[in-house]
Image (cartoon, rainbow, N blue to C red):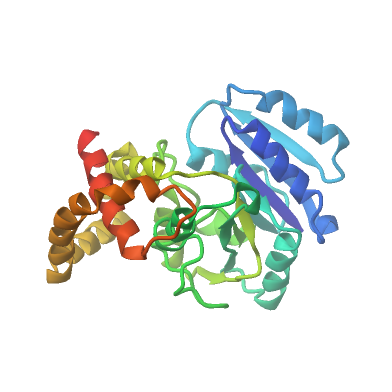
Amino acid sequence: KLSIVIPTYNRAAILRKALAAYAEQTARDEILEILVVDDGSTDETSQIVPQLAKVSAIPIRYLPQGNSGQATARNHGIREAKGEIVLFGDDDVIPTPRMVAEHLSWHLRYPDSSVAVVGPLYWSPELHPTPLMKWWGLNGIRFDPAHMKPGGAVSWAAGPFWNTSVKLGFLKENGVFDERFRAYGFEDSELTYRLEKKGYQALYNPDAVGHHYKRVKFADMCRYRGLIATTPSLKVYETTEAGRCYLEGQARRRATRKYRAQKLITRVLVPILSPLKSLLDSHIPLPGFIYTAFLAYYGSLEAQRH
């Protein structure tokens, strides 16, 4: 019934936790296979996955490839998958016990081939996430944005594939990932844009919860901003219809008075409030506008350095 595709790169220890959590799913018997696509890892992944496969109650298939990027790794999994439904996870996404069951129940509720299911990600409780991490999850990388309602459509601009299940037939008939995206970013939204033009609907199930097992500090968030602004994938994205829509939207936003006012306030406010920077990675909560201003200010500096 269900194939799980997990692309991985040099995260052997966390991948082990993810695979152990899939073995504890309430719907374990509905999982046909787990496909671990190793995108050229140089750590212990090539030893750990075959070892786990020998003792796993769920068939685990280890699919190594040369380092080619996440888009190519996911397509590798799509080609090999045998289930009617493909659930895309990440190697640092730990499924909660009912995550798979929630995906499957919604596919039974919405059997049309064009309907996909997207679940939220929350920070793993084991990491004791800081207030900044929680804010970033809701307002930066948008793990569970407030505007997403149960059963509501997830737009192509969000378009994540880190906790998303899709009918395999629809995917094979209407498009897979663009393998020109070898570096980080944008391959998810680009594919979702193309699929939506073919009738694709990604519905939000808030109960299909995954836990993101990754500690992130303020400096990491700034580097992420710099990476997104300078990644080679952005150049590829700009050549696509989805990328042009994205750039047009960015240009319209930057032309507004509100944006210009916020940018001016940020330039003035952050140096004045610089003593608060030492609190950003603490467990002391700060107002959201402080996080927004500091990330905009230092994130732009990081992008300029690149």
What residue occupies the far front of the structure in this picture?
A: 275
Q: Nearer the viewer, residue 265 or 55?
A: 265
Residue 278: x and y, percent? 36, 45
Can residue 172 be seen at all in this image of the molecule? Answer: yes
Q: Toward which corner of the image does residue 244 lie, by quadrant? A: bottom left
**Residue lying at the far top of the rendered structure:** 42
Q: Is residue 152 left or right of residue 5?
A: left
Q: Split into 4 quadrants, where in the image is the N terminus?
A: bottom right
Q: Position of residue 112 (x, y in %)?
A: 62, 74
Place residue 35 in its image quadrant: top right
Q: Is residue 236 above or below residue 122?
A: above
Q: Residue at x 50, y 50 (%)?
A: 176
234 or 275: nearer the eye? 275
* Lateral position of residue 272 relative to residue 17, left or right: left
Residue drawn 61% across and 69% down?
113
**Depth check: 159 or 256 in front?**
256
Q: Residue at x 50, y 60 (%)?
A: 143
| Residue 109 picture location, percent across and down | 69, 77
